[in-house]
Amino acid sequence: MPGVTERRRSRVGGLAVPRLAWRPLGGFFGPDTADARQSLTALAFSALTSVVAGLTLASREDQLRQLPGLLLFIPATIGLRGNVFGPFGARLSTAIQTGQFSWSWRPDSVLGQNLIAVFVNSLAAGLGLAGAAELLALAIETEGIIPIGFSDFIIVSIIGGMLASVVVLVATLGLTVASVRFNWDLDNVTAPMVTAVGDLVTLPALVVSTVLVRRGDLTVAVATVAGVVTLAVLVGLWRSTLNTARRIVQESIPVLLAAGMLSLVAGLAIERFEARLSWVLLVLLPGYLGSAGALGGILANRLSTRVHLGLVEPTRLPTGLARKDMGVTLALAVPIFILLAIIAQGTALLSGEASPGLALLVAVALTGGVAATLLALAIAYYGTLLVVRFGLDPDNLAIPMVTASLDVVGALTLVASIALWRL
């Protein structure tokens, strides 16, 4: 009967695992409570860690003003960690659930080729992102502001990005170990946990890399070496026999670059709106954008795995498991965005900074967050099914499409919510 506890079996790591499941309203709101609890815990952890990124962003406000163009670059650089490592986790999840995963570190193994693809994607997308940022920064220069140069963007994107990538990679592999050990579903936790670790380490890594920014010949030399190494790695992969890694990179790079451009647009919107972002809203910003993207990422991961397992068919309107997954994603959004507002308010009180008050912060976060999540549901569902229709792997493309779109949508919904509540 609906709404009661029932015995069901879930497939984790290729094994059938019995567990208890409560399905409220006949299961309309999606997965059982074990799945929802895993996602909610990961999202809450992501929200809590986002305060570190927010504090770093707020504390570096003066430095950002001294390096014009860097603020517009931040959402794209943080987003790149999720866009590279989110699909990595999704591919590992699919391999686990289809029985193809093993802890083999050989270059031609499933894990080995995924690691190589992650390394190449991080470098290549970082270089492309630096070029896109330079082009976009030219628009700022026409208004009398001289942004940091192309070499500076390369330093921040590749050097700072790779420093962060090492930590995110270790965290993702650790999450994979834990998922096998504790029977977690990686689809439920990968997106928010990668977002959390990315938020936690990317901004500090970027700050560290800025010591090489605007250093004249030294900056140019380091940027040149980084660019040459990136191109050499790409050529080396294309000449190799690692077909899986090559396919992952081939499918990923275009969408990673497109995602980066969308994120840069989001950063430009934020930079244009910077004067209206108070200290407490700067603290809220990373968690707000990260949570919106993580919610969409959870749905994209689940849909991707269900497509691989033949449990979801492309249809114009969501049906069955797809509709249930969308329902639980929306349900998860409400407590998470309220939590983000509470965290931002608490941080402001502890730091002695001004705040419009908890009620208004909740109103802003919840109004914008629910709107962003509704759009995320549509992007994740139709984006995943569109990728499938083109014969591509949704594990490679769904998360970058969702998170990049959410960078723009998230920024615009936050700006609109701030204007609506007149902060």
Image (cartoon, grey):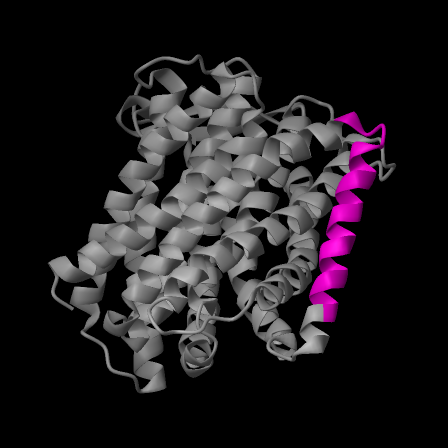
Position above or below: 96 against 259:
above
Toward the viewer: 199 or 74?
74
Image quarter (top left, top right, bottom left or bottom right) of the N terminus: top left
Main SS category, magenta section? helix
Q: Which residue lies furthest to the right in this view?
A: 106
The residue under the point 26% across, 26% down is: 25
Toward the viewer: 154 or 282?
154
Does the magenta portion include 367? no
Position above or below: 297 against 73:
above
In the rendered structure, the answer to whether residue 395 lies left or right of residue 345 reads right
Toward the viewer: 238 or 243?
238
Looking at the rendered structure, the number of numbered marks drawn on it comes to 0
User: Could you tell me residue 42's position as x and y percent?
Assistant: 48, 50
Position above or below: 292 against 61:
above
Position above or below: 145 against 340:
below
**Which region is colored magenta?**
221-243
User: Could you tell me residue 195's position as x and y percent?
Assistant: 51, 53
**Corner quadrant of residue 252:** top right
User: Could you tell me residue 5's position as x and y percent?
Assistant: 38, 28
User: Could you tell me residue 126's position as x and y percent?
Assistant: 61, 53
Toward the viewer: 250 or 292?
250
Image quarter (top left, top right, bottom left or bottom right) of the C terminus: bottom left
Answer yes or no: is residue 68 visible: yes
**Corner quadrant of residue 299:** top left
